Amino acid sequence: MSQYHMTMSREFWDDRKNLSHAVLQRLDRTVDKMLDDPWSTNLHPEKIHHADAGMYSCRVDKGYRVIWKHIKPNDIVLCLVDNHDEAYRRAKRKQFALSDGVIQMADIVDVGAKPVEADGGLWGFWNRKKKDVGLLFVGYKDQELLEMGVPDDVLPRLRVLDDVNDIEKIERLLPEDVYNRLLGIVLDIVERPTVPDAELRQSLERYQGGDDLYRFVDSEEFKRALEGSLEEWMLFLAPPQRALVNRDFNGPARIKGVAGSGKTVVAIHRARHLARQAAAADRKVLFLTYGNRLPPVVSHLLKQLAGDQAPKLNAVECVTIHQWCSRYLWRNGQQLHVDMQAANRALNDAIERARLQYPKLKLWNRQPRFFSDEIRYSIKGRGIASLDEYLALDRSGRGTPLNALQRRAVFDVYLAYQAMLDEQGLCDFDDFILRALDLIESGHPHPRYAAAVVDELQDLSAAVLRLIRHLVPPGRNDLFLVGDGLQRIYPGGYALSQLGIDIVGRSTVLRKNYRNTQEILRAAHGMVEGVAFDDLDEDESPVMEPEYSVRRGDAPELRKFNIPAAELHWVQETVERLRAAHGYQARDFAILYRWHSPYADLIPQYLDANLHVVAISKQADSYFGPGLKHTTFHSAKGLEFKVVFVVGVTDGTLVPRDDWSLKDEELTHYLALERRLLYVAMTRARDRLFLTCSRGQPSRFLEGVLETGLVRTMG
């Protein structure tokens, strides 16, 4: 049984990937022995002099050494692995510090820097024959500063700076956003003290390390990581994310965040954290999502994180809300049947009946979709049971005001629609939630979970939140609610406080984007900047300004073609070009579209069979497995891909699709929803983003970013 706890740095992980197969095998055997006894004479442990306290090395073979830090009594941090001399040189730059309760491993360069000379000024100092290095950015590597956007020719001048006031002298040489980022860094700079072992150990136990450290729960998890069975991005949580995962909340907690801030990853780790406690008490944690594509993905990632046979994995029940309700109703003798064609016929008949009763209302020039949405979101979604409740309802989020007479007419449509479904022994999907909620609120026995982790909160109805509140008794760490109102693709119109879910003092915003390049994030954010949206708060929220990624890449590209087939032909050529030039695999690409028609049918026809084109489904392998992926904007929520092609971004016909029955507030609401959907699609891209359109002009949503955030070319 392992005697030591292992913490791995990202640097060690990167070093390990660059080793030859033979050295890698010897390294893994060395580390396996270190789990039992790093002081074994067979490992030739040596203390590293002139380095941070507790720094040691162990021999991998005649050429390589693994560098590690001992934290009393039995914690080991694997820092790096390299050739003998280089390993020792790098080890002497390592220092551990405690910042805001979280351990970070710093890479300190010993430069003996001197202040800028008064007589020669900054440039006089730089032009001296001896070029000393300043202290202001001493903790940052050249590559890190370049990735922040510092131009190559400005980097040497930045390196000589000692004092925060000196940075103003090169402001004119830097892009405004880069200068602001650097200024934020230096204004927030902290000392990097050597931390006593007791504090360091306590921090590791609580937070699992810092930005580039991951502390493994047990040796089995560590071994799985070395075998490469974990996704790299899942190994390393940033300190703000990790603090949320391990924090004790005295009640429900809400996690907001910009796209790409790792909300779903935090939710998965949180579920695993809570499951360890629930499993010990023979209870379960409920992980709920709305979209049916996410549960298999989340289950797969939980399995990768915890291991197939881990007891805590069995303590997590990962389902959509409709799956849970269907199973609960079935166990209680109710098996519901859905027939959407019959439901549409029933709705049309109900509208005609109400039209005869209220012939003078202007309500009847609206499309059937208006009535189905009103029933789904305002009546069933809010759990409305009577006309009086509907007349008094605040319909925020629906976009169109209705007077009392119009509401009576709509409610009559609802009653007739529901009666026709009941006569045929049918229901719609919202009835699953209402039937389950009715059983529970009437006192029927139901499962009680230790906690619930709810992802994509913004797309859940008030009725769903009422149901969840019944399933998890109020208490510490009961509800962990994760979502981003800007990515809401279904109307809401309620606040959490109205449902008795108090998150005051327990709401956290994640602003840092970890997924997208700066160029992709800027284009997507520029498209929605200034848009207000419902974020389950009392008032509408403005779009959050994200902390832009330090990752840089190509600007997103927009191309126009004559027909959809030409769009896909260009996608095929671009995929092949990127694979040849950058080593991408087919699985790294995804094609996203707003509507199934025409792209879902055309993609398999026009893309090479060698790419093994896969439509993303409810099966985890359709996302994680081989092959180029394609799906709708809706189904792409919560997923990410290295390269994304958003096709059919054609104004008026697809993104958005014009609906001439919509006017005023209702039109504004519809366009805002479609704009957010495009934002969701664009932010699925990690490294590269391409948008295409045909048979028309590019979407009007892109007008604000065409000049600054998108490169426009002809197909």
Image: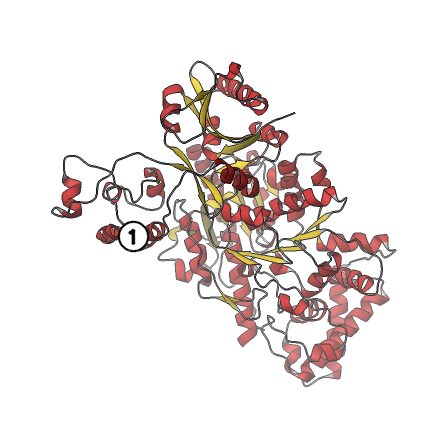
**Circle 1 residue:** 175
Q: Amino acid at mark 1?
A: Pro
Residue extending furthest toward the bottom: 360
**Can residue 271 be seen in this snapshot?**
yes
Say which quarter of the image contains residue 458.
Answer: bottom right
Category of crowding for the residue at label 1, using alpha-carbon neighbours closer than 10 angstroms: few (below 14), some (14–19), many (at least 20): few
In the image, residue 459 lies at what x, y percent? 62, 60
Look at 62% across and 44% down and name the residue there: 615
Is residue 373 in view?
A: no
Is 468 left or right of 239, judged from the image as shown? right
Scheme by which the image is coloured = secondary structure
Q: Is residue 80 above or below residue 504?
A: above
Residue 52 rendering spot, x and y as whole percentages: 40, 31
| Secondary structure at numbered mark 1 | loop
- Residue 94 falls left or right of residue 415: left
Work out whether 352 lies above or below 206: below
| Residue found 68% across the figure and 86% down from its top | 360
Residue 567, given in percent of the width and then of the height, sits at: 48, 48
The residue closer to the viewer here, 407 or 600, is 407
Point out the residue furthest to the left here: 119
Front residue of 557/506: it is: 506
Image-quadrant location for residue 383: bottom right
Q: How many marks?
A: 1
Q: Is residue 291 above or below residue 355?
A: above
> Residue placed at 59% from the left, 47% from the top?
246
Residue 635, x across and y down, in percent: 61, 51
**Looking at the image, is 394 positioned above or below residue 588?**
below
Quarter holding residue 95: top left
Seen in the image, is 385 located left or right of residue 116?
A: right
Q: Which quarter shows the N terminus?
A: top right
